[in-house]
Amino acid sequence: MKRLTPFLIAGVALALGSCAAGGNTSNNGRRADIPKAKVTGKAVTCLPIQTIRESIVRDDWTIDFRTNGSQWYRNNLPNRCNGLGMERAFSYTTSLTQLCNVDIITVIANNGGMGPINRGACGLGEFTPVELTK
């Protein structure tokens, strides 16, 4: 049992360190440093996939999508997507040419040499056109 103690301590230290590495997140997965967003139009339920140029995961609740012409859409997820803010990576599968609020995203964890690992799945919300402020 004495031989396991250093490994146990190291494991706890790593776990606590990874929690601290998440940035300015509170215990509910929301970050304090997300850019403010001024709503510029009516929310839509879908975005054509071919127009999506970039996605930025802000926290466990928020993803910003940039489309053609530098139009930004904020997607406030209806439920917390645990791990999304920490991993900042997701995938999706759809049979349509659009990404919609009924689609499911999968959080991707990149664990080094083992390759990507799925960490869970979450539903999207509506896509609200916004102007991001600094």
Image: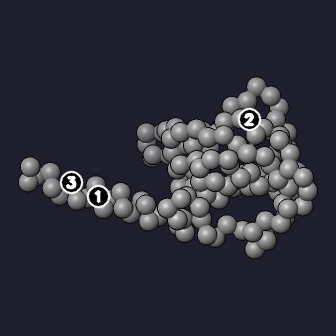
Rendered location of residue 88, percent (x, y): 59, 53
Of circles 3 and 2, which is in front? Answer: 2
Alpha carbons under labels 3 and 2: distance apart: 44 Å
Residue type beneath disc 3: Phe
Mark closest to the chain's N terminus, 1 or 2 = 1
Q: Is residue 34 left or right of residue 25?
A: right
Q: Is residue 128 left or right of residue 17?
A: right
- Quadrant housing residue 85: bottom right
- Please report contact status of discs 1 and 2: CB closer than 8 Å, yes or no: no
Few, some or many residues within 10 Å of mark 3 (<14, 14–19, 20+): few
Q: Which residue does the numbered mark 3 point to in the structure image?
A: 7
Alpha carbons under labels 1 and 3: distance apart: 9 Å
Q: Which residue does the numbered mark 2 point to in the structure image?
A: 102
Rendered location of residue 131, percent (x, y): 84, 64
Mark closest to the chain's N terminus, 3 or 2 = 3
* Image disc number at residue 53: none
Which quadrant is the C terminus positioned in? bottom right
Q: Is residue 103 above or below residue 128?
A: above
Alpha carbons under labels 1 and 2: distance apart: 38 Å
- Please report contact status of discs 3 and 2: CB closer than 8 Å, yes or no: no
Rendered location of residue 104, percent (x, y): 66, 36
- Please report contact status of discs 1 and 3: CB closer than 8 Å, yes or no: no
Of circles 1 and 2, which is in front? Answer: 2
Total numbered circles: 3
Of circles 1 and 3, which is in front? Answer: 1
- The residue at 54%/65% (across/down) is 25
Mark closest to the chain's N terminus, 1 or 3 = 3
Q: Helix, strand, or loop for circle 1?
A: helix
Residue type beneath disc 2: Val
Q: Which residue does the numbered mark 1 point to in the structure image?
A: 12
- The residue at 74%/51% (across/down) is 75
